[in-house]
Amino acid sequence: MSARSLALVALVLGAAAVGTLPAAAEQQTSFDEDSFPLVAAQQQVVTGETTVEPGTEVTVRIQSTEPETPFLYQSHTEVQDDGAFAAVLGLSAVPANTSYELAVHADGTELANRSGTVRACEDDCTDPIPETPTPSEAASDPTVVTVEQGGTAEIPVPMDGDETRTLSVGGPEVNYVINATVTDGDDDGEVLVLFNTTSAGTDAPTLTAADDGDSVSVTRPEPTLSSPLDPAAYEYRLFDGTDTGGSPDVAGTLQIVDDGATDGEYVVEEAGEFGFERAVVRTGQSATAEVPIVLADADAVSLSIGSPDSGYEINATVRDGNGDGRAVVRFDATSAGREGATLSTAADADAVSVRPGSEVALDSRLDAGNYDLTLYRGSEIDGEPDEIGTLVVTARNETASQSGESTTASVTGGDDPVGQRSALGSGAGVLALGGLVGIAGIAVVLRAIRG
């Protein structure tokens, strides 16, 4: 074992590397120097120690400080009894030699931060995940199912007689979802559902029953994926009958870890704090991307997609209408700059409203490429953004919309309602120079990129 690995294990076990935390009136938090440098590879473990209360959930966030290579990743973990914490970050998609800022947060307060540069990976750069001194919630909770990427997970579905239950895996926040009805054919009180991570998003069956007498029937097909399902935490839910509305009877987590990763005591989840839930969102030129946003306590946020340099841009105001602190904005790449509504919301109660004149008109479909995602607190796009991300548009239909039917909602106060833009038809070439279309009393402005 390397010196770094030994130090990581020693830290989380509360050995001499951590030591006794000094008593202090103010909270003290620091990163373990053995966690650095961070490299462009999966499973980078960041450890440290803090004087906050043991059991407190902390978030370790790493964000690019270079606008041309934006990224944002974060991981949640708990403070151990000895004050140690360890967070797992996947940085394989980060370009080497990119500058970053690393910070640890608890209860909305930044406890510590530092800057650095992501180094290139020259060998086996995957860090070992330290063991916790006591069994973690994920390790002891039977509703947490852990499987390596490429493996097959076993999801136990408790049954009662000849009833039918519905299993739903994933959701819009992870850009993947599949639903299936489950029937206990051998009357043993349980159906063991097999989730094949290799088959996910392909023509091969993803969900099957382990026992021949039981049955699993897909009722909501999964989206087509061009690469294996990403390592992440995917929520799964069990509902009585065939209706997935309302609260589930059982909720758990399907944790997919990198091939070769260990027990998964530290479940890597998406953000619960203000910002983008996914720093990188992918879609195809003929597909719809879903951009999950955590508004937290913000009444409204401003979302900008693209930039003048990219040849396309659209700005909008997003509001949380159902009080859950988040909103999923759908971006229809087919409609971008052309006919149809480019932006809508996944939830009926939420609202997205395009700023009049902000969308750039296109006379052909949106080019494949990377487009900036920038997020601002409030209803103004001004100054430095609060969060940044990237929308990756591929040359084929790589990712489709995976939520139910969306309902566009307008926001009062002068913003233009989404979904009321007229079809451009043969006039697209004129509008590409900046134009105004009126239909049913609604004026919609498309603009051209300034020279």
Image (cartoon, helix red, strand yellow):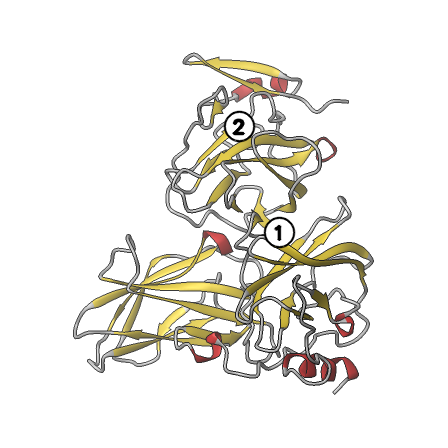
Residue at point 76%, 66% (across, down): 38
Question: Is 175 in front, or is 39?
Answer: 39
Q: Is residue 197 visible?
A: no
Q: Which mark is residue 279?
A: 1
Compared across the picture, whether 295 is left or right of 430 comes to left
Q: Residue furthest bottom?
A: 1
Compared across the picture, whether 155 is left or right of 149 comes to left
Position above or below: 298 against 105: above
Indicate the quadrant containing the C terminus: top left, top right, bottom left or bottom right: top right
Question: Is 52 in front, or is 48?
Answer: 52
Compared across the picture, whether 96 is left or right of 18 comes to right
Q: Quadrant of residue 148?
A: bottom right
Residue 58 location (% of width, % of height): 58, 63
Q: Secondary structure at mark 1?
A: loop
Labels 1 and 2 touching (C-beta < 8 A)? no
Residue 334 location (% of width, % of height): 53, 36
Please, what is the three-letter code of the amino acid marked with disc 1? Answer: Ala
Q: Earlier in the sequence, mark 1 or mark 2?
A: 1
Near mark 2 (Cα within 10 A), the count class, few <14, some 14-19 or many ≥20, is many
Near mark 1 (Cα within 10 A), the count class, few <14, some 14-19 or many ≥20, is many
Q: Quadrant of residue 35?
A: bottom right
Q: Is residue 182 visible?
A: yes
Residue at point 27%, 78% (across, down): 190
Which residue was labeled with disc 2? 354
Q: CA distance from mark 1 to mark 2?
A: 22 Å
Residue 25 location (% of width, % of height): 65, 63
Please, what is the three-letter code of the amino acid marked with disc 2? Answer: Val
Question: Is 266 in front, or is 10?
Answer: 10
Position above or below: 341 against 178: above
